[in-house]
Image (tube, rainbow, N blue to C red):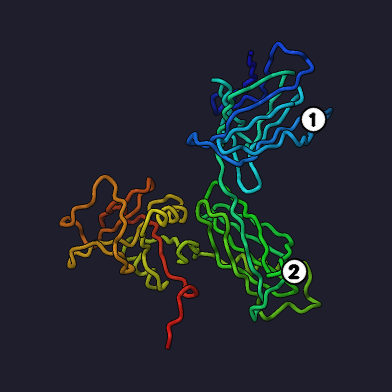
Amino acid sequence: MKYKCKIQKNISHNLILALFIIITSVVNAQEKATLSGIVVNESGEPVINIGVVIRPYKIKPGGIRQEKFITHLVQQTDIDGSFTMTNIPPESIKIQIGDDDTETKILSIDLEGLTLFPEERPPFRMMLFSLEPGAKIENAIIKIKSKIIPQIRARVVAADGTPIADSQVQTAINRNDIDRSGSGRSRGPRRTDSEGYFTEKLRIDDEPQFYRIAIEHEGYFAVSDPFMPHEGQPVVHLLLKLNDKPIPFDDNTPERVTVEFNRLLNTPAVWIRNPINGHDYKRIYCEGMEDALNQSNIEKAYLVSINDKIEEKWIENITGMSECIIGLRYMVEEGKWKWHSGEPVTYTNWGNEKPLNEKIDMQDRVIVRSYGKWNLLSSNQHRGSPLIAVLEKENPKEKPKEDK
């Protein structure tokens, strides 16, 4: 069996793409093709229960592509990540990997030592092939990168707590990059179920983003706090309580709804909720440790405490992997390390070596470097250059009421 590939070169890249694969075999021209192999992730581990779809297609005059949907060419990988497609029509096909719950990118396809790479432009979850009659491809390895597409599961209630059941609501979702370099908005109607719930998938990009959702129902509005799903989180649960002062019926026009959505969603969203611990976090700029402490006092917050690897990873998303001051300080008089919040130090992630206590000045501050490790920054470093710090505070709504 021979493989022929047409590979396109890009000025800014080496070989990046094999658009079409022509597989030739000395077989009867009426035979249909077979394709089998395995789908793996970036680490080479099998990906189970992910969709593999093959669709024959033709390019018609004018560049119009016509695709077919054939039931037996839709499969999910088994417990070993394997798939086998038979009776594939002897014509051009498109192979697509993924499902509705994941965002998938094909990284490469290996055909018995011949490795093909996708084009450097969307869509990344599919590649195009052309099969000769009777072609039989075995042991193909399709390497993919996928991540869960998080969704909102929100419950809509009236001001008195009554669920808004079996009703249509208008939604508007804002998303913003952490550094405010990019943003987007989507709108549309949704229908609540018998208990007032609706679901909405979130659009995700490569850069960390935070979200805010506003809804409208019969002139009443609600808006969520800013939130950011943590990595791998499938569902964000929200409670959206409508206000008690609706837009007058005669004034409830689409234009007025748009104005109100803009008012609610364009309010600066600086605090971001961590769905794991319910705490709020805020990224600030400061001139040094003293300035950071002053800002934390004004905000009635404290410099961030990092209690485990999961929280540290979440904070990396807040800072965008920038160097940042955290709340860990060495208390010379007490002779020990202490978080600004007063929490005990149960987790550290020092770089090459932990600082020697006798050489630490009270004005020194601990920072997280861009590569994720902690280092001590002396008080005379970065003088005059703004630094980033992260503030943290407990959400008052999450605190239990004390018995009187």
**Could you tell whether 249 is left or right of 172 in the image?**
right
Question: Percent x, y for residue 201?
Answer: 64, 55
Question: Percent x, y for residue 244?
Answer: 67, 81
304 over 109 or under it: above or below: below
Direction front: furthest residue: 79
The image quadrant that residue 143 belongs to is: top right
68 over 358 or under it: above or below: above
206 over 42 or under it: above or below: below
Amino acid type indicated by mark 1: Gly
Question: Percent x, y for residue 36?
Answer: 63, 27
Residue found at x 38% / y 52%: 323
Residue found at x 69% / y 19%: 135
Residue hosting label 1: 63
Can you say which quadrant of the picture contains the C terminus?
A: bottom left
Direction bottom: furthest residue: 404
Residue 166's tag is 2
Marks 2 and 1 sit apart, C-alpha to C-alpha, by 45 Å
Residue 387's tag is none
Front in this rendered view, residue 351 or 47 = 47
Front in this rendered view, residue 358 or 69 = 69
**Could you tell whether 354 is left or right of 313 in the image?**
left
Residue found at x 62% / y 54%: 202
